[in-house]
Amino acid sequence: MITVEKAEELIARELKVLPSEKLPFRQVVDRVLRETVSADRDLPPYNRVMMDGITLCSKAWMEGARKFEVEGTQFPGQPPLTLSNSNHCIKTMTGAVLPEGCNLVVPCEEFEQQGNLITVNAEFSAEKGRYLHKRGSDCSKGDELLKEGVQLGPKEIAMAVSCGKDSLSVTRKIKIRVIDTGDELIEAGKPVTDFQIRRSNAHALVAACTRMPFVEASSQHCPDEENVLNRAISESMESFDILLLCGGVSKGDRDLTPTILTQLGFEECFHWVSQWPGKPMWFGKHPTGALAFGLPGNPLSALTCFHRYVVNALYLIAGTESPVNPQVLLTDSITHNPPTTAFFPVSISRSKNGLLEAKPRRPRNSGDFTTIVNTDGFIQLPSGQTTFRAGFFAKLFPW
């Protein structure tokens, strides 16, 4: 068996960023940007008034003027007016361009108006440039504002649109087919006997995939029949980037997945990892570029292997960095028999001093799905150590 670290390394070697596609900006939320976005002009592109009030010439103010006649109103989206008399002022709305001949903004709260005459409070502290969003103060034309590889959220989309982008180049969606095997699996809503279980792994994996907006996933169930599984994999590898095979990867008489994958041209990169749960995990690649992850059929093993290995791979294939796995503090001691790396479900809380704390929730076995319902993820405990005392820091992998 190889180590967890070696498995991670072998997977990373085979990952390639998928091609991009051009989409309208309304369709790229949470997708991965595949171009750089630069400012097409200074931002803001004009001296922008930031308060409703009046604008005037500071020279008149410095000479003692406190009463000003209104000679016009500057609204947002209109060309700048020009102040014709330094003893006059222009009413100016928030967001409007600073009128020509004006360099001082006085907010509404600082003056009184009677008819066409403005009287500024004597206590007002005049300061040129105050309440002004100056042209080019955010960025200059040509400045790079968004880098390739960023995941596009609301602020990134707003930035791109501000730079004149009505469409963006993003990584196309990763297409995943989940194939679960097992004669004992029955679809939800159908009658089930005492010697059968309901098909849940595939639905959990599809749900986990589709929580990432740059992924689209579907599932297919196969009985433990070699020709049926062979056909399902053969057809799927032509249309999907990644195959997630759930079950059939261990040493039983009907654990057919590794053999079939090899027969269909997949090159085995590894099989069996020194970890608990999920030792029988398989990973390989096909010359066409398709990748296959063979996940164990036990529910806890399948979901743990997915979040430990597949999630990171999907982010890298999409062309962006995977989320950071935070360090958490154990609240209770854990024992585990080496030499395998252990993945323990935990519930997360925050201590009074702000540290993330992890309370272990030991499952009964790798088929125990009920234990993890009220957990937030799992921690990775290194091999070669038996006891991990309260206060030990470990890396968290959220579900």
Image: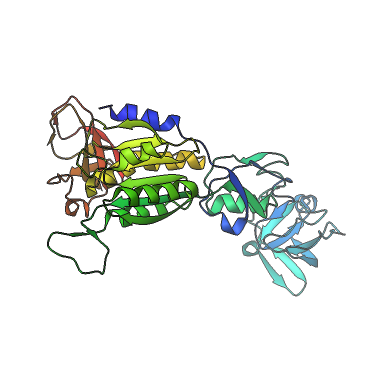
Along the line of sight, the residue nearer the viewer: 125 or 198: 198
| Residue 190 shows in this picture | yes
Give the residue drawn at x 82%, y 59%.
87
Q: Is residue 37 left or right of residue 335?
A: right
Q: Give the image quarter of residue 335.
A: top left
Please report the residue visible at 15 percent of the width from the left and 35 percent of the height from the top. 390
Does residue 2 lie above or below 33 as drawn?
above
* Residue 211 visible in the picture: no
Residue 129 or residue 19, whichever sits in front: 19
Q: How many marks?
A: 0
Colour style of the rendered protein structure = rainbow
For the view shown, which residue lies furthest in the front direction? 227
Task: Please determine whether, in this image, residue 121 is positioned above or below residue 240.
Answer: below
Which image quadrant for residue 84?
bottom right
Quadrant where the N terminus sits is top left
Q: Position of residue 66 (x, y in %)?
A: 74, 59
Depth check: give the residue in front, 209 or 140.
Answer: 209
- Viewer-proximal residue among 49 and 183: 183
Please, which residue is most extreme toward the right here? Answer: 84
Q: Position of residue 330 (x, y in %)?
A: 20, 38
Residue 326: x and y in percent read 33, 38
- Across and down, in percent, residue 68 comes to 77, 63
Which residue is depicted at the point 67% across and 61% down? Answer: 94
Identity of the residue furthest to the bottom in this view: 115
- Quarter of the rendering containing residue 50: bottom right
Q: Is residue 44 left or right of residue 255?
A: right
